[in-house]
Image (cartoon, rainbow, N blue to C red):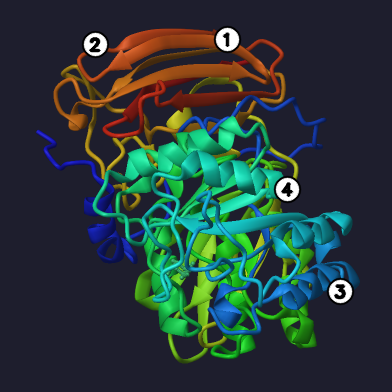
């Protein structure tokens, strides 16, 4: 019986050990290429959790925050903030998508006024905060502020925190035109984190002003399990520093949290250090590539008024930004990581993938993967665009590059014309999918989902019945096959694999023919027997097999498509 507690803590503990164990996928059926058809309308892709319903951050927030460059030093003042807004416009950062100009700790006086209101520091902000917000708005940008869900903020000077003042502070910020709150975790008196962060969420909502809510409790209370319904992003780690080991260590911790991110609700591995001087430009390109690949908020943390051309070139790489801002809203996942050579894949809305090949070692190395490993297939060739050099090339399957020490090569990989399945009766596990997206680890062929490396599951088993053929997934998952209009039926059994243990887990299986749902299992738990589904695929260009978490989180949701059989003519 599978008894491992499915906690992120356990997953992260085993994560490093897992890297390097990943091998290639199963056998592909040989098929003949044909011309590309018009792409069908997309069926929905499941996301992990319902996001806070303020409509904001449907893609990760982009902007600036002064903290990494100034901390509380005197140069953090009105002139700087206005200068950053000017630079957003004059240097094309606004056009590249950067929107929020945010201020961090130390903007206020240490004491509230007689009415209990926060007071802007009159030396730093002689015209108050509203004047700064107005200026930022006059540039077509948005303005963000900072506080802490405690009695005081984090700086040793101890500026007033928001705990117990949520309504009053939120109301004041809204009256100033604040569009964004970063809410820190210092001096929290040990009070319950969810209650503290929810109190401010409710206060922000009560203002009636849309205010992006950035939760900053450093991952201490596993916010990925609850913060999607409270805020728009949540820090996953302690503070970043401007050096390689800090940056790459944070990336490692954030990489394992991909299933929890989605539109309106992002893992936040902290603000960018690009341009602050403690890393090489090669390392900063890795930093920026990985943050985009992880669908992280992109908050510039260097003083843009004096940014070098090299720094601006990194921050304005619109191809990399497009990966971060892709509308599908999936955080990329690690597909292999042997010996410090880390490959990540991120599904994109147009059916392509971005792939990062990162060399974490101290000498140049070749980093390689395959289209199969990154979750696509079913085409005879693939177009590659190098998002830093801008060079283009094609491949039939292998993706490989020489990568400098601490460097990252980043490709956008776009499949060519898909090839349809052969006529007759096919087992899906023997066909090449055009796209596979999975909650934990890769989708498995003829195995259950062991959550980590390819082939790490067990014999597919639902309610005691075993299956030689099928697909082992983990919610939220989505597997797409190209049909080309020539298939009639898909029959399958579905259920939660017995490896989840007892009644654990609950999911819904759905089959889409292009954008039309043609089968739905209803909610199934680990206690249920296998359920038979039949889907009419007549005329469909694609079939998509979707598993959602049924709305109650993704723990134990090991979902099997057992003996899925596709009939084509
Ligand atoms: C904490 C946060 C930082 C910054 C400082 C300000 O350390 O994690 O991002 O806001 O507080 O004091």
Nearer-N-terminus badge (4/2): 4
Q: Residue at x 57, y 33 (%)?
A: 205
Q: Position of residue 105 (x, y in %)?
A: 52, 68
Pick whichever, 469 or 105, lies toward us: 105
Spatial CA distance of label 4 from label 2 is: 55 Å
Q: Position of residue 182 (x, y in %)?
A: 54, 55
**Residue 558 found in image quarter:** top left
Whether residue 495 is visible here, answered yes or no, is yes
**Residue 424 found in image quarter:** top right
Spatial CA distance of label 1 from label 4 is: 47 Å
Q: Say which residue label 4 marks.
A: 177
Whether residue 389 is visible here, answered yes or no, is no
Q: Position of residue 369 (x, y in %)?
A: 51, 64
Pick whichever, 29 or 362, lies toward us: 362
Pick whichever, 299 or 205, lies toward us: 205
SS label for mark 1:
strand
Of badges 4 and 3, nearer the viewer stands: 4
Q: Say which residue label 3 marks.
A: 91
Dot 3 surroundings within 10 Å: few (below 14), some, or many (20 or more)? Answer: some
Q: Say which residue label 1 marks.
A: 518
Spatial CA distance of label 2 from label 3 is: 61 Å
SS label for mark 3:
loop
Dot 2 surroundings within 10 Å: few (below 14), some, or many (20 or more)? Answer: some
Of badges 2 and 3, nearer the viewer stands: 3
Spatial CA distance of label 4 from label 3 is: 25 Å
**Residue 88 found in image quarter:** bottom right
Q: Residue at x 71, y 56 (%)?
A: 143
Q: Say which residue label 2 marks.
A: 529
Q: Is residue 486 left or right of residue 170?
A: right
Asked if disc 3 is less than 8 Å from ligand 1, the answer is no
């Amino acid at each position: 019986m599978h008894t491992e507690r499915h906690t992120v803590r356990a997953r992260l503990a085993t994560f490093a050990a897992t890297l390097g164990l990943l091998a290639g996928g199963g056998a592909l059926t040989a098929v003949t290429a044909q011309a590309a058809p018009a792409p069908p309308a997309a069926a929905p892709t499941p996301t992990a959790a319902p996001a806070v319903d303020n409509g904001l951050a449907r893609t990760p927030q982009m902007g600036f925050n002064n903290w990494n460059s100034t901390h509380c030093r005197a140069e953090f003042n009105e002139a700087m903030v206005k200068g950053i807004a000017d630079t957003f416009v004059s240097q094309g950062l606004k056009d590249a998508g950067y929107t929020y100009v945010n201020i961090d700790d130390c903007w206020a006086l240490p004491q509230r006024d007689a009415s209990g209101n926060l007071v802007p520091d009159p030396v730093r902000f002689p015209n108050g905060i509203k004047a700064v917000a107005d200026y930022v708005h006059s540039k077509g940008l948005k303005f963000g502020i900072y506080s802490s869900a405690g009695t005081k903020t984090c700086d040793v000077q101890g500026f007033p925190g928001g705990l117990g003042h949520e309504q009053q502070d939120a109301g004041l910020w809204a009256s100033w035109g604040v569009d964004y709150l970063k809410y820190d975790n210092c001096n929290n008196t040990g009070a319950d984190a969810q209650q503290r962060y929810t109190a401010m969420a409710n206060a922000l909502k009560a203002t009636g002003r849309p205010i992006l809510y950035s939760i900053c409790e450093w991952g201490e209370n596993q916010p990925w399990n609850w913060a999607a319904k409270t805020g728009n992003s949540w820090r996953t780690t302690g503070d970043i520093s401007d050096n390689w080991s800090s940056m790459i260590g944070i990336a490692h911790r954030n990489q394992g949290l991909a299933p929890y991110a989605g539109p309106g609700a992002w893992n936040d591995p902290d603000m960018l250090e690009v341009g602050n001087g403690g890393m090489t430009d090669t390392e900063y390109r890795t930093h920026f590539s990985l943050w985009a690949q992880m669908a992280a908020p992109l908050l510039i943390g260097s003083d843009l008024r004096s940014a070098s051309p090299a720094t601006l070139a990194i921050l304005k790489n619109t191809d990399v930004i497009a990966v971060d801002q892709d509308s599908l809203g999936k955080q990329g996942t690690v597909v292999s990581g042997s010996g410090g050579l880390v490959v990540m894949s991120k599904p994109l809305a147009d059916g392509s993938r971005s792939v990062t090949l990162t060399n974490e070692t101290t000498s140049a190395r070749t980093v390689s993967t395959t289209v199969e490993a990154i979750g696509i297939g079913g085409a005879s060739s693939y177009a590659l665009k190098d998002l830093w050099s801008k060079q283009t090339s094609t491949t039939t399957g292998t993706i490989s590059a020489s990568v400098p020490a601490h460097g990252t090569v980043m490709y956008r990989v776009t499949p060519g014309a898909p090839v349809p399945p052969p006529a007759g009766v096919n087992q899906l596990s023997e066909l090449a999918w055009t796209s596979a997206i999975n909650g934990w680890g890769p989708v498995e062929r003829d195995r259950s989902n062991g959550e980590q490396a390819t082939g790490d599951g067990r014999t597919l088993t639902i309610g005691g019945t075993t299956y030689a053929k099928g697909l082992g997934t983990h919610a939220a998952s989505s597997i797409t096959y190209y049909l080309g209009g020539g298939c009639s039926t898909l029959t399958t059994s579905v259920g939660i694999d017995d490896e989840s243990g007892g009644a654990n887990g609950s999911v819904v299986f759905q089959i889409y023919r292009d954008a039309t749902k043609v089968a739905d299992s209803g909610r199934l738990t680990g206690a249920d027997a296998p359920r038979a589904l039949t889907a009419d695929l007549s005329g469909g260009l694609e079939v998509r097999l979707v598993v959602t978490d049924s709305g109650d989180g993704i723990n134990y949701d090991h979902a099997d498509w057992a003996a899925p059989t596709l009939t084509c003519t």
